[in-house]
Image (spheres, grey):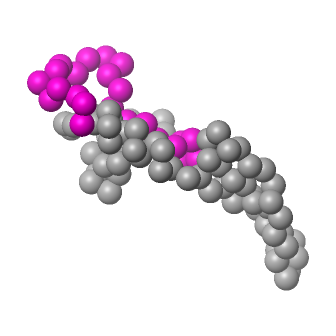
């Protein structure tokens, strides 16, 4: 039998965390869900406002990712892998996290 309870809600970030307990396995997990609509809309606006002729420089913002995804990538050890993150940011499946056109 699985027990499920609301653990935490952060309305400012759109994050809801739910506690799950599986009695058969004697395991507890916390599921994190985030409404990313506002982040994606802001990213689209910023992406469309960029002058593509503008030069890239150090500390140029190229993406904005939701906090829940950030922590997932960090837990998987992928956030520190620069080559992986370049591939991930250039992947068309992740285009809505981009804030600027071009290739990283």
Q: In the displayed structure, would residue 92 be above or below residue 51? A: below
Quarter where residue 17 is shown = bottom right
Horizontal and vertical percent position of residue 33: 62, 56
Quarter where residue 11 is shown = top right
Horizontal and vertical percent position of residue 58: 31, 17
> From the viewer's perspective, is 58 left or right of 74?
left
Residue occupying the point 56% across, 53% down: 35
Name the foreground residue: 29 vs 41.
Answer: 41
> From the viewer's perspective, is 102 left or right of 22?
left
| Count of numbered labels shown in the rendering | 0
Specify the farthest residue to the top.
58
Residue 26 visible (yes or no): yes
Name the foreground residue: 66 vs 46.
Answer: 46
Does residue 58 belong to the magenta stretch? Answer: yes
Residue 83 visible (yes or no): no
| The N terminus lies in quadrant | bottom right
Residue occupying the point 36% across, 19% down: 59
Residue occupying the point 74% across, 49% down: 9
Does residue 54 belong to the magenta stretch? Answer: yes
> From the viewer's perspective, is 89 left or right of 66?
left
Name the foreground residue: 65 vs 48.
Answer: 48
Quarter where residue 10 is shown = top right
**Magenta residues, start to end:** 48-75
| The C terminus lies in quadrant | top left
Q: In the displayed structure, would residue 60 be above or below residue 8? A: above
Horizontal and vertical percent position of residue 48: 24, 36
Horizontal and vertical percent position of residue 21: 83, 69
Main secondary structure type of the part rendered in magenta = loop
């Amino acid at each position: 039998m699985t027990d499920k309870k609301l653990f935490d809600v952060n309305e400012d970030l759109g994050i809801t965390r739910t506690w799950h307990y599986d009695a058969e396995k004697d395991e507890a997990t916390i599921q994190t869900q985030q409404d990313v609509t506002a982040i994606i809309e802001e990213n689209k606006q910023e992406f469309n406002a960029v002058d593509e002729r503008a030069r890239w420089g150090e500390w140029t913002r190229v993406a904005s990712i939701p906090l829940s995804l950030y922590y997932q990538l960090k837990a998987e050890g992928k956030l520190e892998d620069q080559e992986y993150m370049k591939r991930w940011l250039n992947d068309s499946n992740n285009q809505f996290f981009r804030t600027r056109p071009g290739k990283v």
